[in-house]
Image (tube, grey):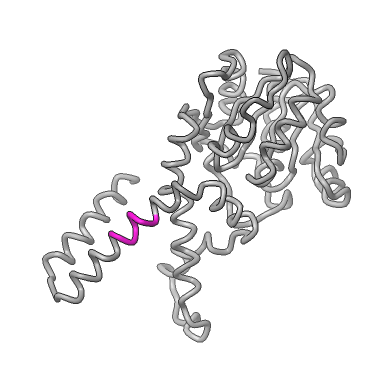
Amino acid sequence: MQIDQLTIVGVGLIGGSVGLAAKSRGLAKRVVGVGRDERTLSRAAAGGVIDSFTTTIAEGVAAADVVVVCTPVDRVAADVLTAVRGAPPRAVVTDAGSTKGNVVRELAGQMPAGGAHFVGSHPLAGSEKKGAAFAKADLFQDRVVVVTPTADTDPEAVSVVDLFWLSLGARVVRMDPFEHDSALAFTSHLPHAAASGLAGVTPPGWLNLTAGGFRDTTRIAAGDPDLWAAIFEANRDATLAALDAFTGRMAEFRAALVQGDRDKLVKWLADGKRVRDTLG
């Protein structure tokens, strides 16, 4: 795959890593960054993350072949629509947001006929860090990217998005956008809430007594609160369903502990261990 111009809307950790990966692999002849802060974009260009930049989406996508929207989930749909309207009809637009159903709903009936095509996607890669300064060229290597076409998505555009992520070293899985949100509520969104909950109830005076277990479990709680609040709001129903399942599971633990039922405690722990062990 060879792209003349790749445009990245939102040059943060994920967008910056897309730029570095595309440049290091010779995937794109030119990488254009779009963002709100010229100083941040200038630093990204100086660091080799992008080749040039603009603060206007329409200008940035005017000659693009592929556009990747890497803005927060509450801005993705609006930014995708602006990109689709400004890009050439040959262009393919995708995103990197961790919620998909909200984008489908917001774009329903809004896409211009005969314009660039949009295909949703979500790379399961990242960090609690933020900003292009933490971008990595190998961030997507051997990581899963979920591509989420709908019944109305152009098949050729889906193939382009598949190939794009594969060319960055990722493994591609296709899912319905709403099924994706239900799954990610358990595998990503609930874990972040649990990590934040554990960190939030721990007295600061006891932090000197923490070791690997606490640090590993709460690492993701260091993520951007505004970004994660938007994710929880965008995937509200699925996150609530996951939270109900989790609180029910913890209620079982509490009951076994109150009853002093060692057998139930062992089984409860063994069930969790069995699932975790399947990850290798």
Give the vertical position of 52 relative to 270 (above or below): above
Instruction: Identify the residue at image location x=69%, y=32%.
Output: 68
- In the picture, measured across the screen, residue 146 lies left or right of residue 119, that is left
Confirm whether the magenta stretch covers residue 73. no
State the residue lying farthest toward the bottom: 205
In the rendered image, is residue 41 in sight?
yes
Residue 33 is situated, as x and y percent measured from the top left of the image, at 80, 37
In the rendered image, is residue 216 in sight?
no
- In the picture, measured across the screen, residue 43 lies left or right of residue 184, that is right
Give the vertical position of 243 relative to 207 (above or below): above
Q: Nearer the viewer, residue 239 or 55?
A: 239
> Residue 165, located in which quarter of the rendered image?
top right
Give the vertical position of 253 relative to 47 (above or below): below
Residue 258 is situated, as x and y percent measured from the top left of the image, at 19, 76
Magenta highlight range: 243-248
Residue 8 is situated, as x and y percent measured from the top left of the image, at 74, 35
Instruction: Identify the residue at image location x=63%, y=59%.
Output: 224
Predominant secondary structure, magenta span: helix
Instruction: Identify the residue at image location x=69%, y=41%.
Output: 15
> Residue 129, located in which quarter of the rendered image?
bottom right
State the residue lying farthest toward the front: 109
